[in-house]
């Protein structure tokens, strides 16, 4: 007979009362992963993937930008949701094998609205997640970002590039929070011996992105599906490299399960598209009659972005497999729509 008790900020493992049932024994034999930010876009897909790999998953989230709808299907014995603000100390009773630290506002709309929360979760939140990994002797993975490269002067961006970031510009709260989080991660590794990994994630798209999160792919897709004009910033010549979420998650898990300690870019270098090309592609794939309108370019919007993934290929044997046409097709299908044209 087992009993599972969950409350904010603390998790108890199922406690055997009599002789352990086969079910309880199998739960204890599972690796346990904590996913901070697990109710968000990437975090919820990561929870899915880890459950698929037989992990028990503890999702820690304060729902600032995430949603219970993203994880509702996961409720069960091997999944726990802990409502918790990670800027506060996190205690988990049971043993933990992996800490995936994804909690942070991630889209410009969110971190411009939540500048202090973004800085706090990047600093105190990362400190708390690293403290948990240290205490549990768990492997720690930081979800960092291509934004650490800022508006890059080197193209494509290898991990050895130090970046070009405006620390006092509007995006500085996110970029510098992530740069600080990387420095903190390296310090816990060198001074405290924590087994750490750093993934520098490039633009990712797919199901469960919030309609109103402001990122170009989801904004264009919903504008096209709603028959509204697609709003392209500037002249649309700025580029992003787009990676489908399943490829990204596969890369994160491979990195966590490797022994790699240095930052690794995870993104799709094949799909560097201008924002104008992306808008046109989405209009074609959805069969929308929407037109394109141009709006002022936001301050410090990076002009170019493309990962150099030589390290990911070399140390993880990872590269993306899903091209833009297939990714957009899968996304539309997940939304219950049928794509009408190949890209
Ligand atoms: P998201 O906003 O969908 O998810 C972030 C999650 O973190 C949300 O569920 C939110 O509620 C939670 N969160 C925020 N502050 C918290 C706090 N103080 N305590 C507990 N939970 C908190 O964003 P996402 O796109 O899924 O991004 C996840 C991670 O990946 C972020 O760290 C982001 O910086 C990184 N990343 C994402 C992308 C991308 O293209 N999606 C690119 C680069 C890096």
Image (cartoon, rainbow, N blue to C red):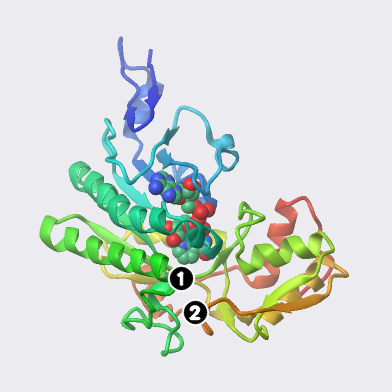
As rendered, which of 195 and 64 lies closer to the eye? 64
Query: Is residue 313 shown left or right of residue 262?
Result: right
Count of marks overlaid on the render: 2
Relative vertical location of residue 3 with respect to residue 53 in this rendering, above or below: above
In the rendered structure, find residue 196 and report the number of the disc placed on it: none
Q: Which residue is drawn at 32% across and 33% down?
A: 29
In the displayed structure, 209 sits above or below 271; it is above
Position of the N terminus by quadrant? top left
Residue bearing the label numbered 2: 300
Image quarter where the C terminus lies is bottom right
Crowd around label 2: few <14 · some 14–19 · many ≥20 (10 Å): some
Q: Where is residue 290 in the image (x, y as percent from the top left)?
A: 84, 70
Quarter of the view holding residue 181: bottom left
Q: Which mark is residue 170?
A: 1
Which residue corresponds to the image point at 50% horizontal and 28% vertical from the top-left? 76
Callout 1: SS = loop
Are the two marked residues, 2 and 1, in contact with CB atoms closer than 8 angstroms? yes
> Label 2 to label 1, Cα distance in Å?
8 Å
């Amino acid at each position: 007979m087992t009993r599972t008790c969950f409350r904010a900020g603390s998790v108890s493992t199922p406690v055997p009362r009599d002789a352990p049932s086969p079910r309880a024994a199998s739960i204890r034999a599972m690796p346990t992963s904590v996913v901070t930010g697990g109710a968000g876009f990437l975090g919820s897909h990561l929870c899915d993937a880890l459950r698929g790999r037989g992990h028990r998953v503890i999702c820690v989230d304060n729902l600032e930008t995430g949603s219970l709808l993203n994880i509702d299907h996961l409720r069960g014995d091997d999944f726990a949701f802990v409502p918790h603000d990670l800027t506060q100390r996190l205690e988990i009773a049971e043993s933990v094998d992996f800490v995936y630290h994804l909690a942070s506002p991630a889209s410009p709309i969110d971190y411009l609205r939540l500048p202090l929360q973004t800085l706090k979760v990047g600093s105190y939140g990362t400190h708390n997640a690293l403290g948990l990994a240290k205490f549990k002797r768990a492997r720690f993975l930081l979800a960092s970002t291509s934004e650490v490269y800022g508006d890059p002067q080197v193209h494509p961006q290898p991990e050895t590039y130090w970046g070009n970031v405006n620390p006092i510009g509007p995006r500085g709260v996110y970029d510098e929070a992530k740069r600080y989080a990387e420095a903190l991660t390296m310090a816990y590794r060198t001074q405290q011996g924590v087994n750490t990994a750093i993934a520098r994630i490039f633009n990712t798209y797919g199901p469960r992105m919030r309609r109103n999160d402001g990122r170009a792919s989801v904004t264009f897709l919903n504008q096209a599906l709603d028959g509204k004009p697609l709003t392209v910033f500037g002249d649309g010549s700025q580029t992003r490299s787009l990676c489908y979420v399943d490829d990204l998650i596969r890369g994160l898990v491979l990195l966590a399960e490797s022994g790699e300690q240095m930052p690794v870019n995870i993104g799709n270098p094949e799909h560097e598209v201008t924002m104008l090309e992306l808008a046109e592609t989405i209009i074609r794939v959805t069969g929308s009659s929407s037109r394109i309108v141009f709006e002022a370019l936001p301050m410090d919007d990076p002009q170019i972005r493309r990962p150099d993934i030589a390290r990911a290929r070399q140390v993880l044997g990872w590269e993306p497999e899903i091209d833009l046409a297939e990714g957009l097709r899968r996304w539309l299908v997940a939304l219950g729509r049928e794509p009408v044209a190949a890209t």
